[in-house]
Image: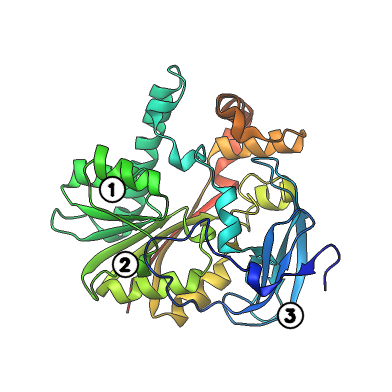
Amino acid sequence: MQRGLVELEPAKRTREALQPAAPPAASSVRVLRQLTSPYGEELEEIACLACGGTQSTVMLEANDRLYGKPGSYRLVRCRSCDLVYQNPRPTLASLGAHYPNDYHCYVPPRKLPFFLRPLMTAASRGQARRRLKSIEKPLGRIQSDARLVDVGCGLNDFLKVVRDERGATGIGVDIKESVVGFVRDELQMPVVRGTLREARLGTGEFDLVTMLEYLEHELDPLGVLSESRRLLKKGGHVAIEIPDIEGWPARTFAHDWANLDLPRHLVFFEKKTLEQTFSKLGYRIVSHERFAIPLYIGISVLFRLGCRDLARHRTALVLLGHMLGIPFLPALPWSPEFSFVIAQAV
């Protein structure tokens, strides 16, 4: 048993913080044992999310740099298939505390300080358009009758741009009640609260499933990709945007890397493990684009300088992050922070 961890009593194994309204779906993840940290957080030690192996090598340990909460989290590499994942990791119940209502994906621009609203509104729309371009570059223009699902839709920025600029109406899926209410009531767009499996969408009915900065948060990444494969028409596509752990920012900043974001980021795919996973699940990769965003490099610099709890100081995080990222602009082509991957159902 790892030092500082103790076995958790079965009666304490609750799953209440992030529990959706629908009954939990079956998971392909094998939990080896349940633990509790010295800070009282429920954790679970798991087998490899990709191959089920139980032997791994520790890569690093890091704290929660975004919110500054106590506790240390471990990133490991599977010795069998090389997948990088967090182990042990918070249970479903424990994860709720790491996604407070002021988490950046949950805060609409209108709730930001007035001088940040135009900047963040433009940034959100620009990000959605950039993602649309990354999808349409290899696949062609999205048609108005296309059927889309965005998993982990957050404030639905991507599907809103698709609706406004392509005329296609997609379905958002998110587990957070407040953002589901925002999408449904304020944007008046289709949305389902829960996981993709709990959405119970029709088999072979969709042209595109997107997971944009979502898959790294998923407790069962192969499960959600498998469910996406069920939903897609033959020849349909899944598009994912994930942190690029192979780039020099990840290697250079290590435990200070902004996109590490433990404990919220649970799994990190590299090119090799992506290819293995998609092939195993009945996909063929058709596009793999790597790119950088100066803001994230700037945030990594802030973390390296010792800054903590920056999520509670959103204005400073955005402004200082952008400023510190500017000197890295010439190096952006060689500084990938993200991978944008599109795979076809075959």
Give the farthest residue toward the left: 145
Specify the color scheme. Answer: rainbow
Q: Is residue 184 left or right of residue 179?
A: left
Residue depicted at 45% across the width and 79% down the height: 279
* Mark before the other along the chain sequence, 2 or 3: 3
Q: CA distance from mark 2 to mark 3?
A: 33 Å
SS under mark 1 = helix
- Residue 186: x and y in percent read 26, 37
Judging from the image, what secondary structure is the residue with disc 2 in? strand
Q: The N terminus appears in which quarter of the rendering?
A: bottom right
Circle on res. 55: 3
Label 3: few (<14), some (14–19) or many (≥20) C-alpha neighbours in 10 Å: few
Q: Residues within 10 Å of mark 1 (few under 14, many from 20)?
A: many
Q: Quadrant of the C terminus?
A: bottom left
Q: Find the distance from the CA under tag 1 to the CA under tag 2.
A: 16 Å
**What amino acid is at disc 3?**
Gln
Name the residue rendered at 76%, 33% in the picture.
Answer: 305
Q: Position of residue 178 (x, y in %)?
A: 39, 43
Q: Is residue 244 visible?
A: no
Report whether residue 277 is seen. yes
Three-letter code for the amino acid on which mark 1 is drawn: Leu
In which quarter of the view is residue 273 placed?
Answer: bottom right
Could you tell which of marks 1 and 2 lies nearer the N-terminus?
A: 1
Check disc 2 and report the residue beneath it: 237
Quadrant of the rendered structure where residue 233 is? bottom left
Residue 308 or residue 244, whichever sits in front? 308
Question: Residue lying farthest front?
Answer: 11
Disc ID at residue 159: 1
